[in-house]
Amino acid sequence: MTAPSPATAAEYREAQRAEYGTYVAVVPIDINGARAFNPGDAVPVSHVENKVVADHEVAKVTTKAGKEAAGIDTDTKKG
């Protein structure tokens, strides 16, 4: 069974945010011989859940590895 399609623009935006806002690539990812994602690119949740990409190729955006792949500074040292 599939989820119902979003009915409004706001629902569509939220569905896209949920699909693309959880994982980022931590290494270059090729699918069927073609580059699909570069490090730091958002990776759809469905690709991870359906094993289109391997777990070790992605990180959650809330983790240090995910933030580093996305180019977010994780240095907490105060100078």
Image: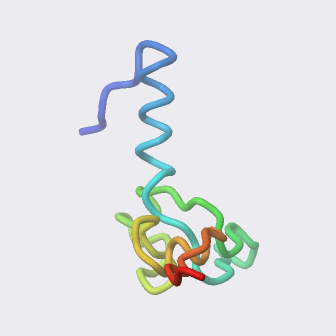
> Against 7, is 36 above or below?
below
Provide residue 24's location: percent of width, then percent of height: 54, 67
Rendered image quadrant of residue 49: bottom left
Provide residue 19's location: percent of width, then percent of height: 45, 47
Q: Quadrant of the N terminus?
A: top left
Q: Nearer the viewer, residue 61 or 15?
A: 61
Q: Is residue 26 left or right of residue 19?
A: right
Q: Nearer the viewer, residue 42 or 52?
A: 42
- All told, the count of numbered labels is 0
Q: Residue furthest left?
A: 1
Provide residue 7's location: percent of width, then percent of height: 41, 14
Q: Residue furthest right?
A: 34
> Against 31, is 27 above or below?
below
Q: Is residue 79 left or right of residue 13?
A: right
Q: Residue furthest top?
A: 8
> Against 21, is 16 above or below?
above
Residue visible at 68% across and 81% down?
28
Provide residue 16's location: percent of width, then percent of height: 50, 38
Residue visible at 48% across and 70% down?
52
Q: Quadrant of the C terminus?
A: bottom right
Q: Nearer the viewer, residue 71 or 5?
A: 71
Rendered image quadrant of residue 34: bottom right
Rendered image quadrant of residue 38: bottom right
Q: How is the image coloured?
A: rainbow
Q: Nearer the viewer, residue 4 or 19?
A: 19
Residue visible at 61% across and 68% down?
72
Residue visible at 45% across and 13% down?
8
